[in-house]
Image (cartoon, helix red, strand yellow):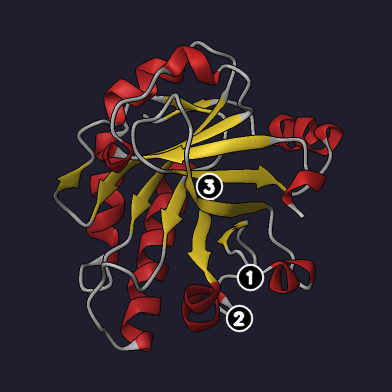
Amino acid sequence: MASHYSVRGLDLSHHNGKIQYDGLDTLDFVFLKATEGITHVDRDFESHYAGFQNKGIALGVYHFFRFDTDGEEQANHFLNRIKGHTFQVPLIVDVEHENNPRVRREEVIQRLKEFMAAIKKKTGQKPIIYTNGHGYSDFVEKEFEDHTIWLSSTNTQRLEKSDFTFWQFNIDADLEEITHRADLNVFRGSREEWEEYLNLNKPYTIQ
């Protein structure tokens, strides 16, 4: 089903190892991990950002949301780390059970609302939410449906019935330009719709 979409991208963090940036010039977008929680910084964020910055590829940046940590503090950590950097896609928050402790659903949602409010206050943006099927049903559905959704799923039946803007359809791709396995993504629309999306989301620099 992913072959139906022509606008392609990757998401990257230090887990992907070494990257041959010049071999990835044909990508349309790349989403980079910057932070996690209130202290962690992805060690390869700057090198990834520099590697793609001048290639005409739309850049986005994401924060891995910790369920057991204050939402506003996480937002401030994220914004402080990416200050001075320019992106073409709204800020992204990664919301998923994996690598998170068990925390009551209501507490996670409240902290996530605090995170969203802090980002909106300082940037005017509603962040894109990255999640998978369980994360969507547990934390996003009915709570954050007015946000753009980036779904991780190999379940095409779920995808066909849902309204998601970005789709991570492969989490185990073997690319010769990347030393470790990579995540492949598509924009769920035509190339013309992608251009319209970028026109609506003008490049911005975090102040």
Dot 3, crowdedness within 10 Å: few (<14), some or many (≥20)? some
Q: Quadrant of the N terminus?
A: bottom right
115 over 60 or under it: above or below: below
- Is label 2 in contact with label 1 (beta carbons under 8 Å)? yes
Rounded to the nearest angstrom, the CA distance separating label 2 from label 3 is 19 Å
Label at residue 145:
1
Query: Could one spot residue 53 in this view of the protein?
Result: no
Q: Mark 2, mark 3: which one is toward the viewer?
A: 2
Query: Could one spot residue 72 in this view of the protein?
Result: yes
Q: Residue at x 81, y 33 (%)?
A: 191
User: For the residue marked with disc 1, what is the amino acid?
Assistant: Glu
Rounded to the nearest angstrom, the CA distance separating label 2 from label 1 is 6 Å
Q: Mark 3, mark 1: which one is toward the viewer?
A: 1
40 over 61 or under it: above or below: below
User: Looking at the picture, how far across and down is residue 121, in whole percent?
Assistant: 43, 51
User: Looking at the picture, how far across and down is residue 192, in whole percent?
Assistant: 85, 32
Q: Which of the marked residues, 2 or 3, is nearer the chain's N terminus?
A: 3
Label 2: which secondary element: loop
Which residue is denoted by mark 2 in the rendering?
142
Dot 1, crowdedness within 10 Å: few (<14), some or many (≥20)? few
User: For the residue marked with disc 2, what is the amino acid?
Assistant: Lys
Residue farthest toward the left in the current orientation of the protein: 39
Q: Nearer the viewer, residue 192 or 107?
A: 192
Dot 2, crowdedness within 10 Å: few (<14), some or many (≥20)? few
* Res 200 → quadrant: top right
Q: Nearer the viewer, residue 183 or 196?
A: 183
Label at residue 125:
3
